[in-house]
Amino acid sequence: MASVEYYFCLNSPWSLFAAEQLLRVRSDHDFDLIVKPIEIARLFDETGGLPLKKRSPNRQTYRLQELTRWSQRLGIPINLHPAHYPCNEAFADALVLSAEKEKGQGLEMAISIGRGLWCEDADIADPDFIASQAEKFGLSAVLDQTQSTRVLAENTAKLIEKGGFGVPTFIVGEQVFWGQDRIDFLIEALS
């Protein structure tokens, strides 16, 4: 059975779009999915990426146009200017890792949190939000920050080692697919 490594960042609306599509793909194709949240600042630092606020105004404007297009195409309404973006996603990442470890639902948790940030204007760093998500998924425990930070550091290093430089990224064997708009190529790799 094929294995797909899915590298993402909850602060990325593109990762939300990718996760929603992956959920659909998973219902039609048989593969192991390995969810791997990463440290986006470190990834950018080590691979030449720029945080949004450091990008040129042209790139920032185009990003909003593309988000609008893809939001409409995928039927995922998002808020282009969420109140809590960018945010500290450390506790939310721990939720994703915990949901994956305990229930095999890391992707579903990432979608729930991503929708909270990008669709519902939630503060995904707020302890009440974190508690509500843990309860919603019936988690008995959430990884502590030391463990979560270690896993994210490992995931980030692995993504860089495999040639990744942005999110979302999917890796199947030696093939790297960057961007939520590469789902069709991912499906071809799985076929």
Image (spheres, rainbow, N blue to C red):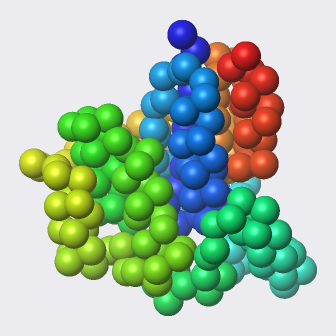
Q: Is 82 rendered above or below residue 167?
A: below
Q: Position of residue 167 (x, y in %)?
A: 64, 51
Which residue extends farthest left? 140
Identify the residue at image location x=47%, y=57%.
111
In this rendering, the answer to whether 118 lies above or below 33 is: below
Return the x and y of residue 25 as percentages of the image width and height.
Answer: 62, 35
Furthest residue in direction top, as rendered: 1
Instruction: Residue 41: give x, y in percent of width and height.
Output: 55, 60
State the residue at coordinates (73%, 48%). 179
Q: Quadrant of residue 190?
A: top right
Visible in this render: residue 39?
no
Tell whether 169 sits left or right of 60. left
Q: From the image, which quarter does the C terminus lie in?
A: top right
Looking at the rendering, which quadrant does residue 110 occupy? bottom left
Residue 68 horizontal/vertical position (percent): 77, 75
Q: How many labels does the image show?
A: 0
Kindly tell me whether residue 98 is visible in this rendering. Answer: yes
153 left or right, relative to 58: left
Identified at 63% across, 47% down, the residue is: 21
Name the residue: 82% across, 69% down: 69
Quarter of the picture holding the N terminus:
top right
Q: Is 28 rendered above or below residue 21?
A: above
Q: In this view, does 159 lie to the left or right of 149?
A: right
Q: In this view, does 1 lie to the left or right of 63?
A: left
Which of the 4 image quadrants contains residue 187? top right
